Amino acid sequence: MNMNELKKFDPEVYNAIVNEIKREQNKIVLIASENYASKAVLEAQGSVFTNKYAEGYPNRRYYGGCEYADVVESLAINRAKELFGAEHVNVQPHSGTQANMAVYFAMLKPGDKILGLSLNHGGHLSHGVQVNFSGMLYKTISYGVDRETGLIDYEEVRELAMRHRPKLILAGASAYSRIIEFRVLSDIAKEVNAYFLADIAHIAGLVATGNHPSPVPYADFVTTTTHKTLKGPRGGMIMCKAEYARAIDKMVFPGIQGGPLMHVIAAKAVAFKDALSPEFGRYQLQIIKNAKELADALMNKGIKIISGGTDTHLMLIDLTGKKITGSDAEKALDSAGITLNKNSIPYDKLPAAITSGIRIGTPIVTRRKMKEPEMVLIADLISRVLDNPEHSPAINRVREKIKALCKKFPVYEDMGI
Ligand code: PLP
């Protein structure tokens, strides 16, 4: 990417971008909710479409000059429909949280009950947590995972649904590593006459490629982000049954947003084209293979994984037997060149700012073409840091190994820096 103008005009921002590129190149990033977008996605997102107001929808705009905006938005919609088999798609939500907001605002009234996975058990803020608008406006009932197995307790979901009769039942998670039984949850929603919303933000890439069962046939609404396993630009999207199309479109615009971010929508279209390719299917499969290998290798080192493994791109490490907190582990690992995030584990006794766990995901290392042997090495390096978080020589040795690994699997090589 050519950044000559930026370098001249605003060296402070230029330098921050250069440092961010170097950080992404020189660390092993295991944040499960992140990915490295392709250069084609970055180019579309950095395009002149950032200039364009296009309130409304293709061929129904409130501004002139939208003919090319219509082209990219229609491409994004049609590709997403093909990718997920959805009846209706809205690609305008600025984020995953706004996608969920649009569904709630379109279908619920303040004070209505929603039933979703508890944040402490892997759910998301926008699924009814008190500090989020969703918890402020709606009465939240939460289901959790079983203390022993770490799996969603579907019987508990059914019992809670019967007892509380929520207006909407939510599936989807930020830190749950196992297959989610969308069909079972959809049946429960039908039993109590609730809407069923599946938030596939994390697993969208896996769903699109058949590597995780799709909720699209069962759910009234499916929301997602486009920047996680899907490897697109930062943003959101809503899919729904045709009968809800009008209500959803009206709620996104003019309900909760003004002009769509056309440069982001152009980049979404590019990401969906990529996601339709056979290569993307192989990428998603390798993400899961890598996650399974990493989980096995960590468990071989005596590290505990919630639910005993993973079916997806992520896993949750339980540090309670390790005498280190999630936040200290995050810091020690980052100083060794491994970036990930602390995360509450189910039934965690520590607060969210400290936690007893860390979350690990494989979308980025797989994007860098790493395979099973590299996962074994990364597990070994993680284990060394967790056992010696304050021992500088050990951390230094890990850092050297990480540097070598990053060099062997380069990324963003021709960024013009
Ligand atoms: N839903 C789930 C399950 C998520 O994990 C996330 C983000 O991590 C979101 C929604 C929200 O996405 P955003 O950060 O774009 O608002």
Image: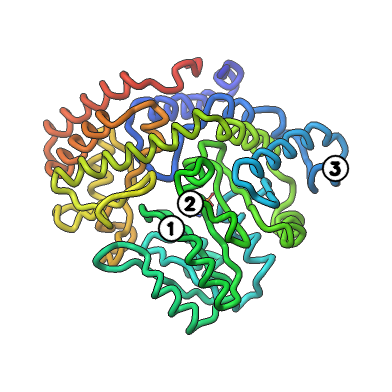
Whether residue 66 appears in this view of the structure is: yes
Mark 3 Cα shell of 10 Å, populated few (<14), some (14-19), many (≥20)? few
Mark earlier in primary sequence (2, 1): 1
Separation (CA) of disc 2 from disc 1: 8 Å
Dot label at residue 213: 2
Task: Give residue 226's position: percent from left, percent from top.
Answer: 56, 43
Does label 1 point to a residue whose CB lies under 8 Å from ligand 1? no
Occupied quadrant, residue 340:
top left
Name the residue tied to disc 1: 180
- Residue 356 lies, with reference to residue 74, above or below; the image says below
Q: Which residue is mark 3?
A: 59
Q: Amino acid at mark 3?
A: Asn
Q: Nearer the viewer, residue 356 or 366?
A: 366
Please name the residue shown 55% across and 47% down the image: 225
**Is residue 407 found left or right of 172 in the rendered image?**
left
- Which secondary structure lies at badge 2? loop
* Horizontal arrangement in the rendering, residue 129 relative to residue 196 (left or right): left
